[in-house]
Image (cartoon, rainbow, N blue to C red):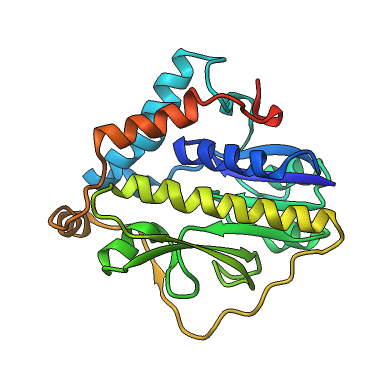
Amino acid sequence: MRVALCVKRDLFGVIAARRFLGALGDVAEVDVFCSTKVRAAEGDVAGLRLLGTLEREFPIGTLQAATPGEWAGAPETWQPLADLSRDGGATSLLAHRPDIVVSMRFSLIFPQRVIDAVPLGIVNVHPGPLPRYRGLFAPFWQVMHDEAQLAASLHMVDAGIDTGPLLAEHRVPRDDRRCLLWHIAELYRGGATLAAAAVRAAAAGQPPRGRPQSAGGQYFRMPDAAAFDVFAQGPMPLVTAAEYLDLLNEALLSTGQPAALAA
């Protein structure tokens, strides 16, 4: 079986990819692709700029660039996708003839042409419970709405945005002693494990089949400056130094990396 793993080239993308590949084992051959899209609005809000620095610019743009070969998962070897256009990224992705695509923290929307071309479909890890938290920054909005548990959903990709049939859900008890970035990592670790289980089942002859989402739900957009101001007044910090260093250690220095991520 051939798997296309589509992630984002950032700190959580590395963590999610490592967890997925470690849980998947040797049941499939995996090609790793990464989106390079950055939304222009990320530069307009101080909170978004901080997250961009913590998630992408410092770990990837600075540390990984300065220490090539030291990362436990080598994102410099991932195949970049700037888009999924017919003559661009879609062709590059489909040229590998994946039997199934796994999307985790991927910044691009799969067009119908790509969905139809993948025999077993596309499964996506969304870091929010569906249908209640569709869209962007689901962990942030779950905390803002004072959820006692945060959740990540594994679902099939269809023509909508976060609307496809549900396969499984991973829940994380909210812990205000820990920061938002820790919760995000936990959601992707659990979601990646669920995705690996779905691929292993598909390799054993049980293709993914989800259940339709319930009616309702809400689509969330990127938080603005006012939303970050409200978050800052809450009990949970956006980031702590100790937990951020732990995330860097997990991505950069953890041993026993899957072969598919080695440089």
* Closest to the observer, 228 or 260: 260
* Residue for point 71% across, 52% down: 101
Left or right of residue 213, residue 142 in this image: left
- Residue 78 picture quarter: top right
Q: How many marks?
A: 0
Left or right of residue 15, residue 137 in this image: left
Residue 27 pos. (x, y %)? 81, 43
* Residue for point 66% across, 44% down: 23
* Residue for point 37% across, 65% down: 149
Above or below for 218 versus 66: below
Left or right of residue 182, residue 99 in this image: right
Q: Is residue 82 visible?
A: no
Residue 190 pos. (x, y %)? 53, 53
Which residue sits furthest bottom?
215
Residue 52 pos. (x, y %)? 35, 39
Quarter of the image with the C terminus in it: top right
* Closest to the observer, 168 or 130: 168
- Residue 242 picture quarter: top left
